[in-house]
């Protein structure tokens, strides 16, 4: 409901339009949520890649002693 309109001052037709608008928003949200659910989620690249990018050799740095 829009905050600028006092429900006590609304006509029955205004109230019906307001309820219909709220209902329409709910239906759109449900339709959009259903559409998102049908799209497969992207797979985690680290689970699907043979060599993940974060894999590094065991000792990438060498330090000279002495």
Image (spheres, rainbow, N blue to C red):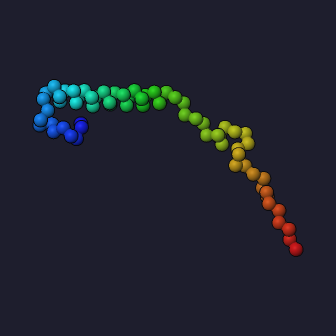
- Residue 21 screen position, x and y as percent: 27, 28
User: Is 3 positioned to the left or the right of 61 in the image?
Assistant: left
Q: Nearer the viewer, residue 4 or 1?
A: 4
- Residue 37 screen position, x and y as percent: 47, 30
User: Is 65 positioned to the left or the right of 4 in the image?
Assistant: right
Residue located 17% across and 28% down the image = 14
Farthest-out residue, bottom:
66
Q: Nearer the viewer, residue 64 or 46?
A: 64
- Which quadrant holds residue 62? bottom right
Residue 16 position (above or below residue 59)? above
Q: Nearer the viewer, residue 24 or 57?
A: 24
Residue located 22% across and 41% down the image = 3
- Residue 47 screen position, x and y as percent: 65, 40
Residue 57 position (above or below residue 52)? below
Residue located 54% across and 30% down the image = 40
User: Is 53 positioned to the left or the right of 40 in the image?
Assistant: right
Residue located 49% across and 27% down the image = 38
Farthest-out residue, front:
4
Residue 61 position (above or below residue 38)? below
User: Is 59 positioned to the left or the right of 19 in the image?
Assistant: right
């Amino acid at each position: 409901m829009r905050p600028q309109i006092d429900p006590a001052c609304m006509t029955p037709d205004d109230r019906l339009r307001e309820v219909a608008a709220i209902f329409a928003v709910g239906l759109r949200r449900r339709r959009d949520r259903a559409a998102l659910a049908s799209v497969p989620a992207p797979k985690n690249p680290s689970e699907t890649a043979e060599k993940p990018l974060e894999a590094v050799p065991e000792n990438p740095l060498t330090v000279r002693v002495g």
